[in-house]
Amino acid sequence: MSEHLPILQIVVPMVSSLICILLRRRLLSWAFAFTVSAITLVMSATLLARVYAGGTIIYELGGWSPPWGIEYRIDILNAFVLLLVSIISTVVLLYAPSSVADEIPASRHHYFYSAYLLCLTGLLGVTITGDAFNLFVFLEISALSSYILISQGKDRRALMASYQYLVMGTLGATFIVIGIGLLYAVTGTLNMADISARLDEVGSNRTVLVAFAFLTVGMSLKLAMFPLYLWLPNAYCYAPSIVTAFLASTATKVSIYVFLRFVFTIFGRDFAFDTMHLDAILMPLALIGIFVGSLVAIFQTNIKRMLAYSSVAQIGYMMLGISFLSVTGLTGGIVHLFNHGVMKGALFLAVGCVVLRTGSANLDDFRGLGKRMPITMAAFVLAGVSLIGVPLTVGFVSKWYLVLAALEQGYWPVAVLILLASLLAVAYIWRIVEVAYFQEAPEDAPEVKEAPFLMQVGMWTLIVGTYYFGISTSMTVSVARKAAEMLMGASS
Amino acid sequence: MEWPGLYNYWIVIILMMTGFYTAISRNNLIKKIIGLNIFATSVLFLYITMGKVRGGTAPIVVEGGAIYSNPLPHVLMLTAIVVGVATTALALALVVRINEAYGTIEEDEIIVQDQES
């Protein structure tokens, strides 16, 4: 049984998403989805522990040996991403019932949870697979179900946001499949490890260059890198609260994982950075992304949209870590991938509580909330502090490694820019603190009480994570460092 | 190689760019989807062209051991067709809902309505 864990990780949520439709009852389907997600969490934690102790796990689907069959290859990097996805999914589902009951008609709940589980399946599948075409299929499973989830938002603009995401996401996925096809034309195989080995023999010719270009652009669209992020703010702004929290913490992170996998494992560091000079594009775009995202965030009046722009900036940090092309930089990038997932999840869950009680996420509705919803606002501030990067929080850990990596390479202006960008984060978090704590609620404001118990539990779980992994960094950093060493070593 | 070489690839490029341009330039939401479809179809063409061996038959056991085309790209494209159908269906369903909510499927008119509300 236990040697089949890699495939169960995918099959359990996939089959469950179908069963979920049949359940029909509102609370039953929620309890079912939550249980399934918790099971995937246990499995991914087991897998990470096993990979950490014993090295890469290779699972052959149906007993067909690679490169003919599909293989699932779990190393320290994707085990870490699997854990992030299943943690966030489980916590968000724990939080979900009241929020979903408020935002989605009761008759559609079982469909909603079904699409949610399908999205989870896709994200886990993208992460776990060692086959390039299988990756594309899972990418589309997660993307299609996330379009459905986003379109469930109350506001009619959610429909347009979902449509725009669909067009951009499909273009991105098609770019990726063109790239995979060109790689197949050169190497005659779809197995990632096999492609990588044969590319070394082929060297670089024009087909490989074109494949690299298509893949890079396609993945940058999916992960919302700076000029290609236009789908993100609307999608996160109008989606139901729990969908925003789930996608913001996982979908772009999984895409960054795919980026790492293609650039480092398949093409190899030498080709991507020495021949193609990817870092020369990546670093400026990452820095521009950090500043544009943070600056635009300061001027938003909708808090969900503000956090979405902040996500664009945070993705910039991760890409910056990758562009340093050093073990420390990659450690910073990978650890930020995990840390940002946890803290942005916490922030969006806190906003979800406010949306439940006040009915909107506009800055005006936050007036006086510090007194009226003290527990929720305390959670928001604690997670916001982490986003700024104050010591003892996870945000500090990742920025520490990024600054360290910048100084290691002698890029001290970059280090200064990272610190300056943190001040911008102070600006946009402070606006909310000011409105919530130092302004009185308007006379006609409706009575609000604290969010329901389960929402508090979900939110505070992530807050505790934000501080736990900020103080005790041994687990996340050592895993990220191992993954970074593997990526740098695999391609040297 | 004499011009035009493997002319299939020219067709792929023309289809790809037609679809891509349509998908990003049209205002009408249905036309965008049509563009996306043409774009996706060019990928089918690309893969099939790759797998074709001149004079090759279907990969079945026949007397005399004939040359056969690579079946794998064809199989992959079956999957890609399914993905394409699912995407198109979802996109059309969204357009129906958008039309119900806004009473139009022209993107510029929708943007105007959103700004007014």
Image (cartoon, coloured by chain):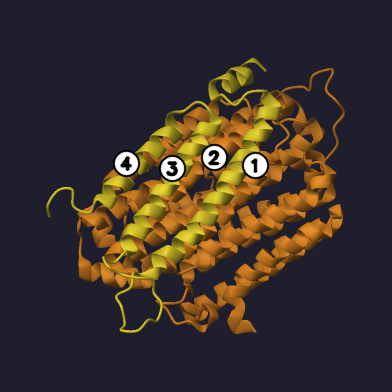
Chain colours: A orange, B yellow
Q: Nearer the viewer, mark 3 or mark 1?
A: 3
SS type, badge 4: helix
Q: Nearer the viewer, mark 3 or mark 2?
A: 3
Indicate the chain on which mark 1 is placed.
Answer: A
Q: Is residue B115 visible?
A: yes
Q: Are marks 1 and 4 in contact (CB under 8 Å)?
A: no
Judging depth in this view, the residue of A463 and A295 nearest the camera is: A295
x%, y% of residue A437?
72, 29
Count of numbered badges drawn on the protein: 4
Label 3 – label 2 distance at C-alpha = 18 Å
Residue under circle 1?
A150
**Mark 1 and mark 4 on one chain:** no
Q: Which image quarter is the N terminus of chain A in?
A: bottom right
Judging depth in this view, the residue of A420 and A487 nearest the camera is: A487
Indicate the chain on which mark 3 is placed.
Answer: B
Indicate the chain on which mark 2 is placed.
Answer: A
Residue type (three-letter) at the residue carrying disc 3: Ile
Query: Is residue A371 shown left or right of residue B5?
Result: right
Q: Quadrant of residue A464?
A: bottom right
Judging depth in this view, the residue of A374 and A138 nearest the camera is: A138
Question: Mark 2 or mark 1: which comes first in sequence?
Answer: 1
Residue under circle 4?
B14
Using the image, tell me which numbered label, if any, was put on residue A165.
Answer: 2
- Which class describes the residues within 10 Å of circle 2: few (<14), some (14-19), or many (20+)? many
Seen in the picture, residue A42 relative to A320 is either above or below; the reply is: below
Please tell me which residue is depicted at 70% across the width and 59% down the height of the picture: A90
Please tell me which residue is depicted at 29% across the width and 68% down the height of the picture: A187
